[in-house]
Amino acid sequence: MAKILIGIMAVVALFMMAESLDCNKCRYGLLGYCLSNSVEKCATNTSTCFTGKATFDALTNVGFNNQGCREPSGCNTTINGTLVGIGYSVKVECCSTDKCNPVTLSGAPSTKMTFTAVIGVAAMASMLGSFL
């Protein structure tokens, strides 16, 4: 009897693991680059991955982003508003397959870089610019 119960528990655990969704997680993103990225295993009540982007009308190339797991409510929505006279747009896009939420900048997936790499590239560009 104990072997049957252990077998049933193993099958249930296998189904639970198979249903878990893995999403890219980014707490802080700027200009399409994630400053702290990881992979998040979603809880059973969150069945979608999301990417949220906030952009400003006056600054077309500047924006913030984050990503992770979420409930399906509120997915695929856009909110527009004004903050201190500057128009902004917040867009939330969702998907439901493993790691289906890459950070994109201008519609193209971007390479996720660490904060150190971003600073290093900026410093090199600055030094190169001073030689020209």
Image (tube, rainbow, N blue to C red):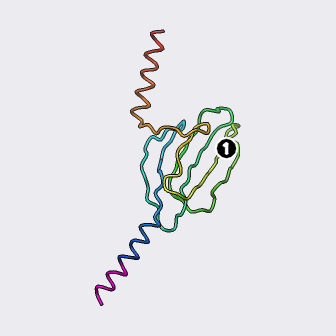
In which quadrant of the rendered image does the N terminus lie? bottom left
Q: Nearer the viewer, residue 44 or 62?
A: 44
Q: Main secondary structure of the magenta part?
A: helix
Q: Nearer the viewer, residue 24 or 80?
A: 24
Q: Nearer the viewer, residue 10 or 114?
A: 10
Residue at x 28% of width, y 87% of height:
2
User: Considering the numbered disc 1 on the image, is that residue within a helix, a strand or a loop?
Assistant: strand
Amino acid under label 1? Ser
Q: Is residue 32 left or right of residue 11?
A: right
Q: Is residue 100 left or right of residue 2?
A: right
Please determine whether, in this image, residue 70 is positioned above or below residue 110: below
Query: x%, y% of residue 67?
Result: 52, 50
Residue at the bottom extreme, as displayed: 1
Query: x%, y% of residue 95?
Result: 58, 56
Residue identified by numbered label 1: 89
Please determine whether, in this image, residue 96 is positioned above or below residue 27: below
* Figure disc tally: 1
Residue at the top extreme, as displayed: 132
Was residue 16 drawn as part of the magenta stretch in this picture?
Answer: no
Query: x%, y% of residue 79?
Result: 68, 49
Residue at x 43% of width, y 72% of height:
15
Which residue range is magenta in the image?
Answer: 1-9
Q: Residues within 10 Å of mark 1 (few under 14, many from 20)?
A: some
Q: Is residue 132 left or right of residue 88?
A: left
Residue at x 71% of width, y 37% of height:
85
Q: Is residue 11 left or right of residue 98?
A: left
Picture quarter containing residue 3? bottom left
